[in-house]
Image: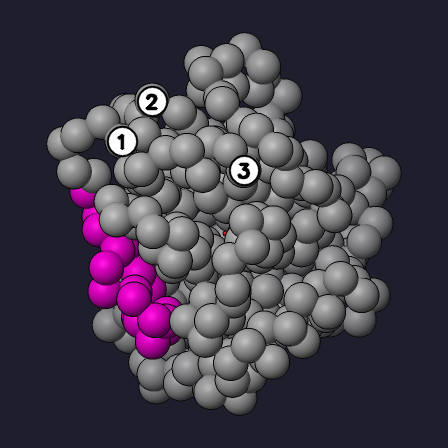
Amino acid sequence: MMKISSKLLSIIRQNKSFLIVCHINPEGDAIGSILALAYGLKILGKKDVCVLSRDGVPETLKFLPSSKTIKQTPPKKVFDVLCIVDCNTLERTGFKDLKARNTIIIDHHILPDDADKSELYRKLSASVIDPEAAAAGMLIYRLLTSLKIPIDKNIATNLYTALLVDTGGFHYSNVSPESLAIASHLVEAGARPWDITKELYESVPLKRMELLGLSLSTLDSKDRIAWIITTMDMLKKTGTTAEDTEDFVEFPRKIKEIEAAVFLREDNIDLFKISLRSKGRVNVEKVAKSFGGGGHAAAAGCRIKGTLQEVQNKVFKAIRKELRIK
Ligand code: 5GP
Ligand code: MN
C-alpha cells in the first residue's frame, strides 16, 4: 500500500483546526474513516475538529463511537485543513464550497479523467489516493500509525467497520494479507467483530426485508447481466427509504454464470441511482464513468435520467460493450 507522504504528515502535525468530510449517501467505510480520523487528531491534541456528512449517519451505523458528533452542515469559518475522505471530488461531498487554508484527499477511488483540470486538484496541499487500498479505512489506519497515534478501542471499532463494509465482510477480491493483518491488529486493539457484525448485518428491520422481497420479485437476467429494481412505490408501500437498499445489488451478483450485477433504484420520476458490481471480467468503473459516476473496477455507481426502460437499455448496452457482447 502507498506510503503516506511526509508533506501530508507535516500538514497534519502543524495545523490546529480540521474539517473532515465524506461522500453523500455514506456507508461504513465513509463514516468509520472520518470518525477514526477525528479520534486520531484529538489524540494528537487537536481541539478544533469538525466531522461532516451531508446525509448524516445511516441508522445501522449509529452504534459507531462518536457518531453523534457528525454534523450535516459546516460551521461558518475557515478551517486550517479540509480532509476529503472516501471520495475525491467536492461534488461527491455534496457541498459546493468548503473553504480551508489547506485541502487534503484520503481516498481509494479511481480519479476522474478530468481531475487535473479541476480547481480542487490545483489547490490540493497533499493527498493519499490509492485505488489498490480495499477501504479508505486502510489509508486512515496507515496515516494514524505513521503519525504514531495509538489505536484505541474507539478508533479500532470505526476502522474495523470501514474494512468490514468495503471488503463485503472480507469476501471481495480486495481482501489481501495487508487488509487481514490490519483487521487483526484492530481486533487486538479492541474492535469486537461479532458485536459489529450484529449491528451491521443482523439487525435488519422487518420492513427492509419486505422491501427486499418486493425488489427481488423483479429479478431478471440476460447476456450474463442480472438485475433487480426498487421503485418509489415499493419504498412507500413498505415505509422504507433509499438507505434501506444499501446491499441489494449483492443479490443479483450471487447468481452463477453472471458477470455483472445491476441494481436500479428509482430516486425520482425518470431518475435512477444505479449500482454496478462485477465478478471480475467487466470493469464497472468504466461503465459508471461513462454516465458521470465512478467507483472501482468491481463496484461502481452512477445516476441516470430517463424512464426505467431507457435507463436499463443504456446501462445494459454499456455493460455488453465491456463484455464484448454486441
Ligand atoms: P454503491 O453502488 O454501493 O452506491 O457504490 C459503489 C462504489 O461506487 C462506491 O465506491 C461508491 O463510492 C461509488 N459510487 C457510487 N455512486 C457514485 C457516483 O454517482 N459517482 C461516483 N463518482 N462514485 C459513485
Ligand atoms: Mn470506501
Looking at the picture, which amino acid does disc 1 mark?
Phe
Q: Are marks 1 and 2 in contact (CB under 8 Å)?
A: yes
Looking at the picture, which amino acid does disc 2 mark?
Arg
Circle number at residue 201: none
Helix, strand or loop at label 3? It is: helix
Q: Is residue 59 magenta?
A: yes
Q: Are marks 3 and 1 in contact (CB under 8 Å)?
A: no
Few, some or many residues within 10 Å of mark 3 (<14, 14–19, 20+):
some
Residue shown at 46% from the left, 31% from the top: 11
Q: Is the CB of the residue bearing disc 1 within 8 angstroms of ligand 2?
A: no
In this orientation, which residue lies closer to the viewer: 267 or 4?
A: 4
Q: Earlier in the sequence, mark 3 or mark 1?
A: 3
115 up-or-down from 1: above or below: above
- Name the residue that disc number 1 marks: 79
Helix, strand or loop at label 1? It is: strand
- Name the residue that disc number 2 marks: 101
Decide if residue 237 is in sight here.
Answer: no
Picture coordinates of residue 298, whole percent (x, y): 70, 51
Helix, strand or loop at label 2? It is: strand
